[in-house]
Image: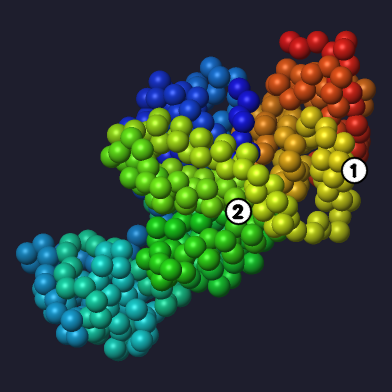
Amino acid sequence: MRRSRKVKILATIGPASSSEDMLKKLFEAGADVFRINMSHTDHELMRTLVGRIRTVEKAVGRPIGILADLQGPKLRVGKFVNGKATLTLGQTFTLDDNPEPGNSTRVYLPHPEILRSVEAGDRLLIDDGKLELKAVKSDGKAIVCTVVAGTSISDKKGVSLPDTDLPVGALTEKDRSDLDAVLATGVDWVALSFVQRPEDLAEARKIARGRALIMAKIEKPQAVARLAEIIELSDALMVARGDLGVEMPLEAVPGIQKQITRAARRAGKPVVIATQMLESMITAPVPTRAEVSDVSIAVFEGADAVMLSAESAAGAYPVEAVAMMNRIASKVETDPTYAGIINAQRSEPEATGADAISLAAREIAETLKLSAIISYTASGTTGLRAARERPQVPIVALSPIVNTARRLSLLWGTHCVVSPDAIDLDDMVDRACRIALDEGFGKPGDRVIITAGVPLRTPGSTNMLRIAYIGSDVQAR
């Protein structure tokens, strides 16, 4: 099945979409990668979902990527005597290490790292920012605050700290357990939540040992401040606009989204735009005009993927949400202004032979109006470089390794095919032409451009370009 668009769709699985039949419908509607949210999924269910996705993958004959999204550190206040408390603006309210139920003057904060780290002047946002506190003083055991905005607080509400750099890693004990479990099932991507600094990625990479690629979720101001370093150590980025919009001013989020998207594109790292893209479709069969515009902006920016969360996981119209996102993306990519916008944001290639080859492949393919760029890739690096160029012609990534093909299913404009490795150069050309014909990217008489590494089967050695005709003797399977 060949997609008619270049941007990919990442759909979250949940109660509304976890059956094998529904997963197949979501794929047919346009989902390229499935996300499993480990905040709401135990290990047994996760393994079941992975098994169902792989069954669907076999049925449709296309590699499907799986992203396991780790919960990350969830910071919450304790409980209240009556389940909640009413506050007044300007009053003093304390968060402390006393486990007794709270009231209108104080509440337990079961996170000593916060008590030790918050300084006078720091903001504390409770319940997604509905309550804003400002620290007046802190002694390591209690934080005395002033109520700045909001008048209510209740049991177990989340705490966000936009001004505080916490001395804790992004992996909790639950995350480590979840990471071991998802790696054992062979997921393709792991998303790391609440990354603050590049060091947060180190532990996850050490545990993964290359068994899955690591996606850094950018949802804290500390991560935005150190974006360049985080990009360098991650395999992909997610613009997680939900928590980002809590910890930073809402009006700043669109600009930050553009900054992250363009920085990721320059670095040749995939970037996913997430959260509330078609939020109204949780309960309605059609989105708002503003939501359509929101998805369109991400596509115009050249994001690799756009993501559905509750829309596909728990909404009443999961298939319709995926189909709508597919229609929006497809329409944007045929807009007369699209190619110009994508081209204007293209960055200079790195000074390497492989990047020069990828640049040349795009320019030759577009100048000669070739049918496709065929990239042989074992590790996925050649596919990444081809996608970084954002060519107008399709990219067909051929890999003998199914895990590589699944990972590349997240990449912009990349159609992944699992194919046995070529025996020699002649076989490589013949195989590329036949697959282009099989997959609907050309017909006899058309030309394609092939990129590969010579000697064959040498990872990271992209050094060859070859223009080839799809001859009349090439037979589709």
Q: Residue furthest left?
A: 82
User: Splitting the image into 4 quarters, where does residue 380 fall?
Assistant: top right
Residue 234 image position (x, y, % from top left): 62, 56
Residue 320 image position (x, y, % from top left): 40, 32
| Residue in the image at 75% along x and 37% along y | 393
Q: Tell me which amino acid carries mark 2.
A: Glu
Q: Tell me which amino acid carries mark 1.
A: Asn
| Residue in the image at 54% along x and 52% along y | 297
**Looking at the rendering, in which quadrant would you find the C terminus?**
top right
Q: Is residue 314 visible?
A: no
Q: Are marks 1 and 2 in contact (CB under 8 Å)?
A: no
Residue 258 image position (x, y, % from top left): 57, 61
Seen in the picture, residue 12 relative to 469 is either above or below; the reply is: below
Seen in the picture, residue 7 relative to 351 is either above or below; the reply is: above
Left-right relation of 254 to 314: right
Between 53 and 314, the one lying in front of the other is: 314
Q: Nearer the viewer, mark 1 or mark 2?
A: 2
Query: How far is mark 1 from mark 2, CA to CA?
Result: 29 Å
Q: Any mark on residue 463, and which?
A: 1
Q: Any mark on residue 186, and which?
A: none
- Answer few, some or many: residues within 10 Å of disc 2's Cα (few below 14, many 20 plus, some between 14 and 19): some
- Answer few, some or many: residues within 10 Å of disc 1's Cα (few below 14, many 20 plus, some between 14 and 19): some
Q: Which residue is mark 2?
A: 301
Between 409 and 78, the one lying in front of the other is: 409
| Residue in the image at 84% along x and 29% along y | 448
Q: Which secondary structure, mark 1?
A: strand
| Residue in the image at 44% along x and 24% along y | 25
Seen in the picture, residue 18 relative to 235 is either above or below; the reply is: above
Residue 286 image position (x, y, % from top left): 36, 38
Between 359 and 399, the one lying in front of the other is: 359
